[in-house]
């Protein structure tokens, strides 16, 4: 009951874990598919064992949840820590995972006050030491925007409940601590240093990434290029890398006279050590364990099939850590492995034809990963079908083997490594040039947005049909069906009858997205922005937070939005338009609206110039500006005076959408409110409170005039200005107005169908 059926038990176990963690939709979906598969094989014993697997992993899941607790609280300020990972330095920031004497894991985030201390930390903070640290514990940030990355949940899957922010790391009082992990990390540190000292920066970042899994030196723009092409997996240690390293080592053993049997035994024993040496990252360890099971299946084919080996590896890892089921890398690697394992007939047809075999492997991998990639990243690489055929052989035959060879040669004293390093660097330059130009081709990426549960089921069914067509040898039908699937994914936002108005949580600032039904209009009011302070060169960080790149762009992608019909910049304050410059590089914009003479301010002038460079019409709204789209109407009301003076010269947007009337007031204060009331008699169901609820805005007279039922305050959590004012909040409450606040509720969304809609927030 084991051979040929482990796949079903792994599937049942995944369903049990999903149920334990409350993912009932996913669990039900897996169970329904499993029942369909079991009906086909008609084996009662397998059905019984699947039930056992479900119950067993359901229980393991509950036990994991119950044991995932913390013994610390915010009252704790003194700790003794030892590093679990090598510290990462980015400017004046140091991060590392550490273990305490209680055995609980923490994430350390230390802002280094002086360059001398940074040097001392690099040299003295070693993994095999136990060091006293004083500091405060912070809870990881929770999800604050729809479809955004949930850092709190991410760390929870690693059983990390706190971020330790040290006030002082007492290096002088560290004591020696002997541990296997410490010795492995010290060896890893030595090998990284070996690469840095013997190779150019350009070559070393590839050798470190491909052999030791260290991608910290990779530039963001290069990683983005590889993501667009769907080949970023080549820069991480995976089954491909493990296979090449294992094959090279095996051949080396045979060449030195070691027998096949002993070569296999040594290889099986050394690969796990290599996994620890690369940092013990889950993707690497999964690849190694999977490779070992595959070796076992080759040695004992009557005991395990290839598919059984993949299933056994999955069962082992899930039993050890049920949280792995929610790891994107785990989902992708096993979805691809299972799909390849079930596609034997495809590869029999393409055997001994290298190009067609590569094309078949790429097609299976790309197709199988579509639902997971879309669910987590909201877009898929169309270029990946071609890029993998080109770049996988390039990495397999040249870049990875050369990296291995150069690394080994660097240990030979006085070996002339610089000439080879230069040749390798030139090869990498050519590869990057090709990747960069390929990524700029039109339609390299399809942005479809995050599918809901119904859409996800349809996509899963479509992927199953596509894989079935491939297995049946109907390649033309597969190509036609896949193209149809891509058209369907692209059209999804355009066939949705639902619209939404979202007050995005960008901290202290404003950014509001209006998305009309059937994608008849998409408008963004302001972009938010953050202040940056001048730092010394050693303090400057490579990875800095950006509202455009880390909040706005991902949220737009999650909704399948690649183009804005209008970008309305209410006025020239940084907290309203500071992120616009970067956003213009991330999304297409048809038209930009600005307040009269606001372009006289430097920040708005830069935006106007960038708009002109991108041939985006910039409309300086000096008179009332109106338009309609679908069943919605919009009116931009400009300030009356001709001299731009700041908050009271904000553009005002009055809108009718979703059966409600809306008034978006920018940073309008009391004087501006008075001027507005003199010129217009505006009533609105929903009021976007001016100037983040400052005491100088939202006067009693203005509230009586507008008479809203709902007020939304866009404001940063624990902001230094004390917004919103208690007086403003009291005035709103006194009139029975429902208040939504982004500092407490996170992003706030009004989702509507026709003239009916409801408000929801990210934080309940």
Image (cartoon, rainbow, N blue to C red):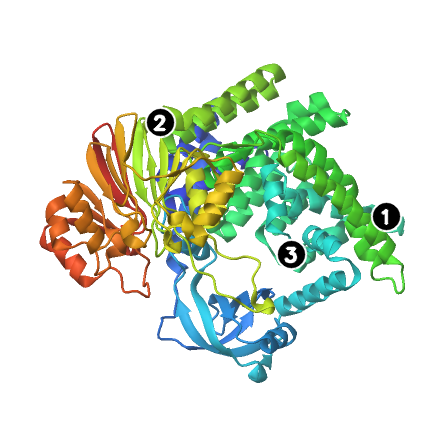
The residue that label 2 is drawn on is: 520
Residue 271 vertical position relative to residue 74 in the rendered view, above or below: above
The residue that label 1 is drawn on is: 254
Q: Nearer the viewer, residue 87 or 158?
A: 87
Q: Residue at coordinates 62% horizontally, 77% vertically from top-left?
A: 120
Q: Is disc 3 surrounded by few (<14), some (14 to 19) or many (20+) residues within 10 Å?
A: some
Label 3 element class: loop
Measured in 3D between alpha carbons, the distance from the residue under mark 2 to the one under mark 1, in whole angstroms, is 66 Å
Q: Nearer the viewer, residue 422 or 597?
A: 597
Is any part of residue 61 visible from this angle?
Answer: yes
Label 2 element class: loop
- Looking at this rendering, what residue extends furthest in the bottom direction? 173
In percent of width and height, residue 229 lies at: 62, 36
Q: Earlier in the sequence, mark 3 or mark 1?
A: 3
- Which quadrant of the rendered structure holds the N terminus? top right
Measured in 3D between alpha carbons, the distance from the residue under mark 3 to the one under mark 1, in whole angstroms, is 36 Å
In percent of width and height, residue 540 lies at: 56, 64
Q: Residue at coordinates 63% horizontally, 39% vertically from top-left?
A: 231
Label 1 element class: helix
Q: Residue at coordinates 78% horizontally, 58% vertically from top-left?
A: 199
Q: Earlier in the sequence, mark 2 or mark 1?
A: 1
Q: Is disc 2 surrounded by few (<14), some (14 to 19) or many (20+) residues within 10 Å?
A: some
The residue that label 3 is drawn on is: 217
Measured in 3D between alpha carbons, the distance from the residue under mark 2 to the one under mark 3, in whole angstroms, is 43 Å
């Amino acid at each position: 009951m084991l051979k040929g059926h482990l796949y079903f038990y792994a599937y049942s176990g995944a369903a049990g874990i999903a149920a334990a963690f409350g993912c009932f939709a996913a669990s039900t979906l897996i169970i329904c598919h499993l029942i369909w598969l079991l009906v086909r094989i008609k084996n009662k014993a397998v059905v019984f064992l699947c039930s056992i697997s479900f119950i067993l992993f359901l229980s393991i899941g509950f036990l994991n949840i119950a044991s995932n607790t913390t013994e610390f609280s915010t009252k704790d300020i003194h700790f003794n820590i030892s590093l679990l990972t090598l510290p990462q330095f980015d400017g004046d920031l140091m991060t590392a995972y550490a273990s305490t004497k209680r055995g609980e894991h923490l994430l350390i985030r230390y802002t280094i006050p002086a360059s001398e201390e940074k040097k001392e930390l690099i040299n003295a903070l070693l993994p095999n030491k136990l060091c006293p640290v004083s500091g405060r514990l912070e809870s990881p940030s929770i999800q604050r925007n729809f479809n955004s990355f949930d850092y709190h949940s991410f760390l929870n899957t690693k059983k990390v409940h706190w971020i330790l922010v040290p006030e002082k790391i007492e290096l002088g009082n560290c004591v020696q601590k002997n541990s296997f992990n410490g010795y492995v990390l010290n060896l890893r540190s030595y090998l990284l240093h070996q690469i840095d000292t013997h190779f150019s920066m350009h070559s070393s970042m590839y050798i470190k990434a491909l052999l030791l899994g260290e991608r910290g030196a990779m530039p963001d723009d290069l990683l983005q290029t590889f993501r667009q092409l769907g080949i970023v997996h080549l820069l991480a240690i995976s089954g491909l890398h493990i296979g090449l390293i294992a094959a090279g080592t095996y051949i080396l053993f045979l060449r030195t006279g070691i027998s096949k049997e002993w070569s296999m035994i040594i290889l099986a024993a050394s690969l796990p050590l290599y996994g620890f040496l690369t940092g013990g990252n889950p993707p690497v360890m999964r690849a190694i364990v999977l490779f070992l099971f595959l070796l076992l299946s080759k040695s004992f084919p009557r005991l395990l099939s290839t598919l059984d080996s993949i299933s056994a590896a999955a069962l082992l890892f899930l039993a050890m850590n049920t949280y792995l089921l929610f790891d994107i890398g785990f989902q992708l690697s096993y979805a691809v492995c299972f799909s390849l394992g079930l596609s034997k007939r495809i590869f029999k047809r393409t055997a001994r034809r290298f190009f067609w075999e590569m094309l078949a492997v790429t097609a299976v991998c790309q197709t199988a990963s579509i639902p997971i990639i879309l669910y987590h990243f909201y877009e898929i690489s169309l270029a990946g079908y071609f890029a993998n055929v080109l770049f996988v052989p390039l990495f397999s035959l040249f870049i990875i083997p050369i990296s291995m060879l150069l690394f080994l040669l660097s240990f030979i004293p006085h070996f002339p490594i610089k000439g080879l390093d230069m040749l390798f660097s030139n090869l990498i330059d050519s590869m990057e040039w090709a990747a960069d130009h390929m990524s700029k081709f039109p339609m390299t990426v399809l942005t479809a947005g995050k599918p809901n549960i119904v859409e996800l089921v349809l996509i899963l069914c479509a992927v199953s049909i596509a894989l079935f067509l491939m297995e049946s040898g109907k390649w033309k039908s597969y190509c036609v069906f896949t193209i149809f699937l891509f058209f369907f994914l692209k059209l999804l936002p355009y066939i949705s009858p639902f619209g939404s108005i979202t007050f995005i949580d960008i901290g202290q600032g404003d950014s509001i997205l209006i998305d009309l039904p059937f994608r008849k209009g998409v408008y963004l009011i302001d972009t938010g922005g953050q202040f940056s302070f001048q730092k010394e060169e050693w303090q400057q960080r490579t990875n800095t937070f950006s509202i455009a790149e880390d909040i706005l762009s991902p949220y737009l992608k999650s909704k399948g939005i690649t183009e804005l019909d209008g970008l309305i910049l209410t006025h020239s304050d940084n907290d309203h338009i500071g992120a616009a410059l970067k956003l213009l590089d991330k999304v297409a914009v048809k038209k930009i609206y600005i307040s009269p003479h606001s372009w006289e301010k430097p920040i708005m002038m830069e935006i106007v110039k960038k708009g002109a460079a991108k041939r985006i019409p910039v409309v300086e709204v000096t008179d009332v500006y109106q338009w309609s789209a679908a069943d919605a109407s919009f009116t931009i009301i400009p300030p009356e005076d001709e001299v731009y003076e700041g908050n009271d010269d904000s553009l005002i947007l009055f809108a009718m959408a979703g059966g409600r009337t809306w008034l978006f007031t920018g940073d309008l204060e009391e004087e501006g409110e008075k001027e507005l009331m003199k010129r217009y008699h505006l009533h609105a169901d929903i009021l976007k409170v001016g100037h983040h609820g400052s005491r100088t805005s939202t006067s009693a007279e203005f509230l009586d005039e507008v008479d809203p039922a709902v007020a939304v305050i866009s404001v940063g959590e624990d902001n230094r200005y004390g917004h919103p004012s208690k007086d403003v909040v009291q005035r709103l409450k006194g009139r029975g107005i429902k208040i939504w606040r982004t500092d407490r509720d996170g992003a706030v969304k009004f989702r509507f169908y026709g003239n009916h809609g409801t408000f929801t927030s990210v934080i309940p």
